[in-house]
Amino acid sequence: MNRFRPRRRTILIAVLALLASPPLLLSYVQQATSDYRYDDPARLPVERIAIVFGAGVRRDGRPSRMLADRVQAAVDLYQAGRVRTLLMTGDNSSVDYDEVSSMRDYAVERGVVPADIVLDFAGFSTYESCFRAQAIFGVGEAVLITQRYHLPRAVYTCRGLGVNAVGLGTPDWGRYSSTSMRRYTTREAVATLNALWQVHVIRPLPTFLGPFEGIG
């Protein structure tokens, strides 16, 4: 029986390592992106392009509260002269669901020149938005705009796919309900692990590619 103990010990160590790896991987993404994430717009490097990620629309077609906060942050940077072009990327998977047109309309209502807005209707995920930003729109450098809880994954993914990205994190905890934020952060942890798999292992193509529309 003694000869089986080393094997059991090895299996136990492997299982414990597997259970411990998600927190370590999540911590790695946080640390790897820490120098590229900003909360204060005044400290953010000036960039030509801001990438604004979709975050849901209401039944009336207006941006959700979370999406409105992202677009407003982009509008503020634009009006301060810290970015010149807004690449709005999100989900337009059906005729009655259009995040990016809602984002555009919201920004135009607040003074952004329509010619300074580029729409990516096939940004169905953070990974696809980052992939398409580089492959379709030729973006080499950009500031990413999203909530703080999502920003590490967004920055990590874009940088892993060839976009030299920094990010502006908009407030989340304390702004939205604690129940919502617990749900979002739990989902984000799973999505971050999936992003590592996508960026470093499988590198899937996005749902749609299409012709080059370079803005970068």
Image (tube, grey):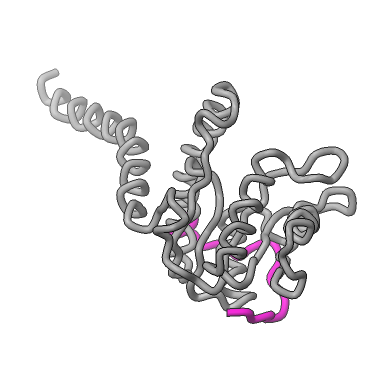
Toward the top, the furthest residue is 1
Which range of residues does the magenta coloring cover? Answer: 198-216
Q: Quadrant of the C terminus?
A: bottom right
Q: Which residue occupies the foreground of this view, 52 or 68?
A: 68
- The image quadrant that residue 111 belongs to is bottom right
Residue visible at 27% across and 34% down in the picture: 17
Q: Quadrant of the N terminus?
A: top left
Q: Which residue occupies the foreground of this view, 202 or 155?
A: 155
Whether 153 is drawn above or below 20: the answer is: below
- The answer to if 129 sits in the magenta stretch is no
- The image quadrant that residue 113 belongs to is bottom right
Whether 52 is drawn above or below 179: the answer is: below
- The image quadrant that residue 124 belongs to is bottom right
Residue visible at 64% across and 63% down in the picture: 206
Q: Position of residue 56 (x, y in %)?
A: 72, 43
Residue 201 visible at all: no
Q: Position of residue 92 (x, y in %)?
A: 79, 55
Residue visible at 43% across and 48% down in the picture: 39
Residue visible at 14% across and 23% down in the picture: 5
In the shown orientation, is residue 92 left or right of residue 169? right
